[in-house]
Image (tube, helix red, strand yellow):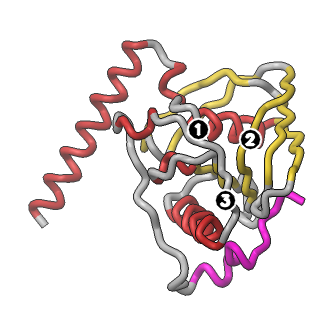
């Protein structure tokens, strides 16, 4: 019920050969203000949305990551793609998600494709019940715990303009900003000398 039809995102054997229909999207990085944009609900379920989802999976797997919110690729609608499986063969699409119940708490070390190379412990609900829509706009309910629950909550934060670094103290958040700025400067100087 949750897995994406592999026609939408090709299985790993087919991913090895380039697919002209899919494109890598640029991942917006902290502290870019576009990451603070609140996403609007998805209202049109069409071929354009299907293409965006395929592009998001391609981008997420290439990064590599386990989740990606549309906000991270500068598309500000309530759309998440996830795959927390070890084999990267269980893609999930979650559209217009809403947490309707949560239980317990857990601390997980999180990272983020928009905050590359930075990891921090974040406390989140241990389990969540999410009401959402699938790629065709049909309602779905997701019961998640463990890593999947963390990933859903993390990606849903992006939809309201929140990042995992917002859970850190202001001092730690500023250190993260400076570290990322230094990484970008170093990458730019390496590129310039090449």
Please tell me whether residue 35 is drawn above or below residue 22 in the rendered image: above
SS class, disc 1: helix
Q: Quadrant of residue 39?
A: top right
Q: Residue at x 47, y 53 (%)?
A: 73
In space, the residues marked 3 and 2 are separated at their CA atoms by 15 Å
| Sooner in the amino-acid sequence: mark 3 or mark 2 | 3
The residue labelled by disc 2 is: 97
Contact, mark 3 vs mark 2 (Cβ under 8 Å)? no
**Where residue 99 sits in the image (x, y, percent)?**
79, 31
Contact, mark 2 vs mark 1 (Cβ under 8 Å)? yes
Q: Quadrant of residue 98?
A: top right
SS class, disc 2: strand
Please tell me whether residue 180 is drawn above or below residue 65 in the rendered image: above
Within 10 Å of disc 3 (Cα), the crowding (few <14, some 14-19, many 20+) is few
- Per the rendering, the mark at residue 44 is 3
The residue labelled by disc 1 is: 159
In the rendered structure, the answer to whether residue 95 lies left or right of residue 146 reads: left
Dominant SS of magenta comes to: loop
**Where residue 108 sits in the image (x, y, percent)?**
67, 29
Please state the extent of the stretch shown in magenta in the rendering. 1-16
Q: Quadrant of the C terminus?
A: bottom left
In the rendered structure, the answer to whether residue 117 lies left or right of residue 184 reads: right
């Amino acid at each position: 019920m949750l897995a994406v039809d592999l026609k939408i995102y090709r299985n790993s054997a087919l991913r090895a050969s380039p697919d002209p229909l899919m494109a890598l999207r640029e991942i917006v990085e902290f502290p870019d203000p576009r990451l603070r944009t609140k996403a609007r609900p998805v209202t049109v379920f069409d071929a354009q949305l299907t293409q965006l989802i395929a592009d998001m999976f391609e981008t997420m797997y290439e990064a590599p990551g386990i989740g990606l919110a549309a906000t991270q690729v500068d598309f500000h609608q309530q759309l998440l793609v996830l795959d927390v499986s070890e084999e990267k063969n269980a893609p999930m699409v979650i559209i217009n998600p809403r947490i309707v119940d949560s239980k317990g708490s857990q601390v997980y070390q999180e990272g983020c494709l928009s905050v590359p190379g930075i990891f921090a412990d974040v406390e989140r609900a241990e389990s969540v019940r999410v009401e959402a829509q699938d790629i065709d706009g049909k309602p779905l309910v997701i019961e998640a715990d463990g890593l999947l629950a963390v990933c859903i909550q993390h990606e849903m934060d992006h939809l309201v303009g929140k990042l995992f670094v917002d859970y850190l103290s202001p001092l730690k958040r500023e250190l993260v900003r400076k570290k990322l700025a230094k990484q970008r400067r170093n990458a730019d100087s390496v590129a310039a000398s090449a």
